[in-house]
Image: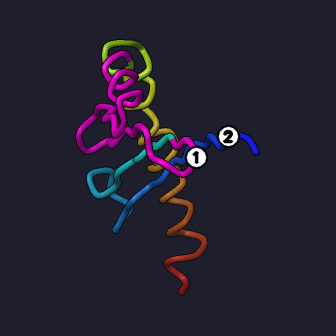
Amino acid sequence: DGFLHFRTGTCLFNSTKADDIAYIESYYLNKLKIISFDSRVEKYVGYTEFGVYNAKAWNEGPEVIQTRNEKERYCVHNVGLDYRTGLAKS
C-alpha cells in the first residue's frame, strides 16, 4: 500500500565519442513513465497530463539547463571509465 516514485539516469553509447553518447533521464510514478529528458532532443517530454504540465515548466526553467549538462558530467566521464576498465578488455 502506497506509492512508488523513482528516477532513472541512462547513458546510451556505442563509442567514447561525445556525439555517440545520449543521456536519458526518466521519472516514473507507480511504474508509469510520466516525464523524460533526452539529450538528443535537449528537452523534457511529458507522457501523462501531469508530465506534460511539468515538461512545459521544466523546459522554461533552470532545470533544463542543468539536465543538459548531465550528458557531459555523468555520461561522457563514466563511458570513458567503462571502456577503459571493462569493455575494451572483454
Residue 3 belongs to magenta span:
no
Q: Are marks 1 and 2 in contact (CB under 8 Å)?
A: yes
In the rendered structure, which amino acid carries the disc numbered 1? Asn
The disc at residue 3 is 2
Residue drawn at x 26%, y 52% is: 19
Residue 30 belongs to magenta span:
yes
Callout 1 secondary element: loop
Q: How many marks?
A: 2
Where does the magenta region start and end? Answer: 28-57
Residue drawn at x 43%, y 39% is: 34
The location of residue 32, given as percent across then percent down, is 48, 48
Residue drawn at x 66%, y 43% is: 4
Q: In the displayed structure, would residue 20 be above or below residue 69?
A: below
- Taking the image as shown, residue 14 lies to the left or right of residue 88, namely left
Specify the farthest residue to the front.
Answer: 1
Which is nearer the eye, 60 or 32?
Answer: 32
| Residue pointed to by mark 1 | 30
The location of residue 25, given as percent across then percent down, is 45, 43
The location of residue 30, given as percent across then percent down, is 58, 46
Query: What whole-number distance in Å separates the C-alpha atoms at marks 1 and 2?
Result: 6 Å
